[in-house]
Image: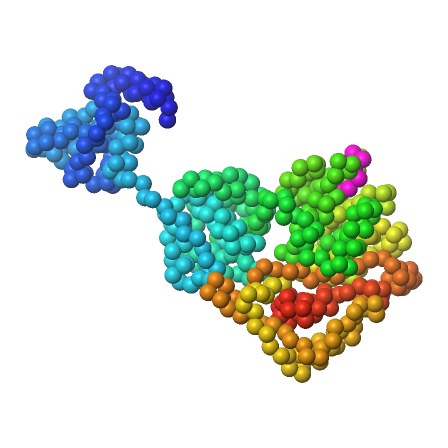
Amino acid sequence: MSQDARRDEEANTERRAQILGLVYTNTSGTAKKQLYKDLLTLHDLYALRVIPLIADDHNITFGVTNTTSQQTMLMLRQQFLDQRVGFTLISDTGFREYMKLYDPPKKIEYHEIALSAAGSEEQIKQVSTILAQVKADDMLAYLVQQAHRLNASDIHLETQHDHARIRFRIDGVLHRIAEIGIDKYRILISAIATAGNISTAATDAQQGHIAQLVHMADGTPVDVNVRLETVPTINGIDVVMRLFNLDQSMYSLDRLGLSEHERLIVDEIIAKPSGLVLVVGPTGSGKTTTLYSMLNSLNTEERKIITIEDPVEYQFAGITQISVTTQNAGQTSFADKLRAVLRLDPDIVMVGEVRDNDTAKTALQAALTGHLVLSTFHASSAAAALTRLMDVVGENPLFVSAIRLIMAQRLVRRLDDSSKVAYQPDEQTLAFLQRIIDTFPADTPKPQLSGLQLYKPGSSPDNPYGFSGQIALREQFMMKNQVAEVLSQARRPTTQEIEAAAIASGMRTMLQDGVLKVIAGHTTLDEIFRVIG
C-alpha cells in the first residue's frame, strides 16, 4: 500500500472513531510493536478482531476495528475483571500488520517433483503437503510448472471417495503425483472453473481454456496455458488439463522426427500449398503439434493464413486466429466460420477439427478452389480416415483430386539411449518381424535380420523407467497410382482394400514404421503393441 493510501485510511479511521466516541490510535507510527501472546489465543485474535496494544498488571488497552462488535468488548471486560480494560480504534491495515507479527506467514518451499520418485509415498506426501499449504492459484501454477519441467502432456485431477488424486501423463503413461482432501479440491476446482469459464454445477462434460500469468507464493512467475476437459462423476468433477508449450520455436518440422521420405512429401506440399491435408489419430497423438509445425513453416509475409480453432491453443505472430465454440446448440459451427473465412481471400486455412459432414464438405470445396486446408480428423488409420470421408461426401469423384495428404500418427515412448539394454531376439520375435518386413512396399529398403540386436528399457537413478520422450509412428497416404484406380471403381472399396492399394503405391503403415524404429533401437516391440495393438 502506498503512503498516500495509508494516510487516507488512517484519516478515515480517525473520523470513524469520533463518530463512535472511541479513542483513535495510529499504529503506523509505532516503530516497535509490543506483543502480548499470553492474553488471547491466535484464534481469538482472528475471530474477535482485536489486538492488545498495551497491557500491565492494572490496565489493558485493546485495539479494535470497525467490525469489532459491542458484545466482544463487553465479553473482554468480563474476561479481564482484575484490570481496567479500554478500547481504541485502529485501521484494518494496522490490524493486519499486527496479525503478521502474531501469526507470521509460513515460508512455502516448493520442492521439485522428480520422475525417479514418481509414485513413491514419500514424494506424494511431500507434494500433497505443499498443495495443502498454498492458495488455489498457486496450486494450479505449481502443478503446471512441474508438469512442464517433467515434459508431461496432461494433468489429471480425479475425484475418489474421500480424496482427490493428481496424476501427470509423462511419455504417454500416467504417474501418481499427489493426493489432496475433498475440501481443498473443491477450492482448486472453483479456481479452475473461474479461470477457464466453466461451471462447477454443470451436469454435462465441458471444455475450457486457461491462459494467465500466475505468481506463486515465492514470487516465481508461471505461464498457465492449458485446455480443460471436465466431466461430472459420482464423487465430483474430474478434470484433465492439456498443457501447451508457449515457445514458438518448438513448433518446427525439424523437431517432428520426420524420415527423409516423409519430409520430402511435406516439403512438396509447402512448396505448392493447395489441396486438403488431414492429420488423423486419437486424442494425445500429437496431431495439433504436427499442424502447428506445418503452419509455422508456411507462415511468410506473402501468405495470408487464417485458423479456426476450438479453442485457440497457441497464438502465432502473423496468423489470423479465430476461436469458435461448438459445444452448445445454436452456436456458429466450424462450417459457417469456414465459409465466412473463405470470403477473406486466405491462402491457407487451418480448421481445428473436422467434426461434421458440413465442415468436411466445405473444407473439400475450399481445397478444390486453390486453398491449402489443414485439419485434424479422428480415425484409426489413414485408410480409415478416407473411408469416413467417403461416407461424408458420398459418391463425389472431385474429392479424390482435392486430397493432398492424409497423415496418421501415434506416439510411443522412446528408449533412453544412456540406459537401454541390448538383447538377442528369439526365433518367434524374428519370425514376426520378418512377416511385417515382407509386407513392405516394393521400393522400400528391407532391413536384414541376420545378427539383429534389439533393445529393452534399462534403469538409472535419474530415470528408473528407461524411456525418455516420445516418437511418432506415421503413415502418409497420398492419392496416386493404385489408390486412384481403386477409388474410381463403381463399387465402394473397403478400408482394407484402400490400405492395400496405398501400400502397393508406396505407403508405409504405422506398424511397418514402428518395426523399423524397433530395429533401429529407438523403441520396443511392447511399445508398438501397446499403442497400435
Q: Quadrant of residue 89?
A: top left
Task: Give the image's coloring scheme.
Answer: rainbow
In the image, what residue occupies the spot 56% across and 69% down?
Answer: 420
In the image, what residue occupies the spot 54% across and 58% down?
Answer: 169
Q: As rendered, which of 142 and 280 lies closer to the eye?
A: 142
Asked if residue 208 shows in the view, the reply is no
Confirm whether the magenta stretch covers residue 195.
Answer: no
Q: As rendered, which of 505 and 455 lies closer to the eye?
A: 455
Q: As rendered, which of 250 and 158 lies closer to the eye?
A: 250
Give the x, y percent position of residue 250.
63, 48
18 sits to left or right of 219:
left
Asked if residue 125 shows in the view, the reply is yes
In the image, what residue occupies the spot 73% across and 54% down?
Answer: 279
187 sits to left or right of 15:
right
The quadrant of the picture occupied by the N terminus is: top left
Point out the stretch of residues depicted in magenta: 344-349
Q: How many marks?
A: 0
Give the x, y percent position of residue 296.
70, 44
**Majority secondary structure of magenta residues:** loop
Give the x, y percent position of residue 471.
64, 60
Q: Quadrant of residue 27?
A: top left
The quadrant of the picture occupied by the C terminus is: bottom right
408 sits to left or right of 442:
left
Q: Is residue 468 above or below residue 108?
A: below
In the image, what residue occupies the spot 49% across and 48% down?
Answer: 145
Q: Is residue 443 above or below residue 363?
A: below
Give the x, y percent position of residue 206.
58, 47
